[in-house]
Image: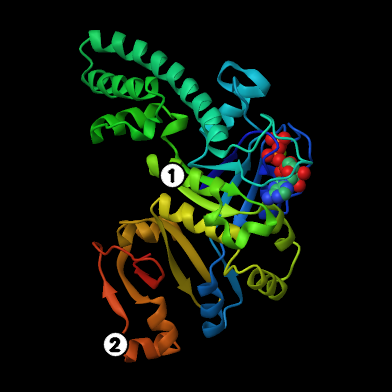
Amino acid sequence: MKIGIVGLPNVGKSTLFNALTKAGAEASNYPFCTIEPNVGIVKVPDKRLDVLANLGRSNKIIPTVIEFVDIAGLVKGASRGEGLGNMFLGHIRGVEAIAHVVRCFDDDNITHVHGGIDPVGDVETINLELILSDLELAEKRIATEEKKAKSQDKDAKTKLSGLLKIKAVLEDEKPVRTANLTDREKLLISRETQFLTNKKVIYVANVGEEEVGDAENSPHVQELKAYADLNGDGLVCVSAKIESELSEMDEDEAEIFLGDLGLKESGFARLAREAYSLLDLISFLTTGEKETRAWTIKKGTKAPQAAAVIHTDFEKHFIRAEVVPYEDLVASGSWASARENGKLRTEGKGYVFQDGEVTVFLTSA
Ligand SMILES: Nc1ncnc2c1ncn2[C@@H]1O[C@H](COP(=O)(O)OP(=O)(O)OP(=O)(O)O)[C@@H](O)[C@H]1O
Ligand SMILES: [Mg+2]
């Protein structure tokens, strides 16, 4: 899973990215300090893995990962190439979801490119650039498909009808993801064209350190939340500053620090969870002496395709899966007792995994 971090210049993208990856991308009070996109691989926090690894005396823990791309600030006019615009827009095309960082913190010492704190205004500025860029793309695609449709290409007609719906939505200054396409239109269009505003979006409200425990009640955040809800987008509140401090601490220190702030988990853990839910992802788990590991699948994935995430051969050679929910395995204390207690189920090719199920695949390979 690849998530692109976007936002206006100087809103805290790199601070957040650094905290996530400790990758050392430069963060400073200076617009446009990120010029090349920085990519960082981040482990998805999952406490269940520690518990299972302990139970099974695993030698190592392998969490799933999210790849973050720190994309430099987008400005008004980016779709026309302003402020290194087109290059940045290009970087967004390769990601599955967008984390849109929005400045909600007050600090007179840190320049805001438009002068004042205005979360919805900021977000609209960027979204309009993405929409304009998509509109240009839609028009190009329509011209191509019109030609093909004349030569009686049936798919071209379907694509054309979908693209016209997309164009209408964009002209209304709405994102492509709100267009009402048929499944066939969606499939044919998405095979060839990646619209920027078709990606899932999570707004990351970057709030001040002092308000992070009660961020949901900040007027800036509430305004942004109302906007996000309009398009079914996600929202998490974080303080990039706090995340940055957290990234320097060990686990115990971090827990105490979070507790003092009235928080249960880091902003990143919440961001990861929101991304999973928005993208319809779940994790299934495997555990043994060698390792305890989390694997990411789309909700609704059947057992053989889930097995293929571990090893492509497993799909073809799939026989059955033994499955036990995480809580039941922990309550039983071991795989053997889970079996004795009747908590272990045997599932076949049609089985659909639930989040947190622990499994062993039996294959003929
Ligand atoms: N929650 C916060 N509270 C206070 N200050 C913050 C917060 N988040 C970021 N900052 C400060 O804002 C400034 C800009 O941050 P950063 O460099 O991360 O922005 P950016 O979005 O990556 O900018 P650019 O688009 O120019 O790369 C830094 O001085 C950073 O310390
Ligand atoms: Mg930056």
Residue bearing the label numbered 2 = 342
Amino acid found under the numbered disc labelled 2: Gly
Q: Residue at x 29, y 78 (%)?
A: 345
Give 68 or 223, whichever is nearer the viewer: 223
84 vs 242: above or below? above
With 336 as the anchor, is 16 left or right in this view? right
Closer mark to the observer between disc 1 and disc 2 = 1
Percent position (x, y) of residue 344? 32, 81
Regarding residue 350, the answer to whether it shows in the image is yes
Percent position (x, y) of residue 287? 49, 75
Image quadrant in which the C terminus is located: bottom left
Q: Residues within 10 Å of mark 2 (few under 14, many from 20)?
A: few
Coloring scheme used: rainbow
With 145 as the anchor, is 278 left or right in this view? right
Q: Residues within 10 Å of mark 1 (few under 14, many from 20)?
A: few
20 vs 46: above or below? above
Q: Residue at x 57, y 64 (%)?
A: 45
Percent position (x, y) of residue 46? 53, 68
Give 256 or 26, whichever is nearer the viewer: 256
Amino acid found under the numbered disc labelled 1: Ala
With 175 as the anchor, is 119 left or right in this view? right
Residue bearing the label numbered 1 = 226
SS at circle 2: loop
Alpha carbon of mark 1 to alpha carbon of mark 2: how far?
Answer: 47 Å
280 vs 48: above or below? above
SS at circle 1: helix
221 vs 262: above or below? above
Mark number for residue 29? none
Q: Residue at x 39, y 57 (%)?
A: 308
Percent position (x, y) of residue 136? 45, 16
Give 360 or 45, whichever is nearer the viewer: 45
Which corner quadrant of the image does residue 333 belong to?
bottom left
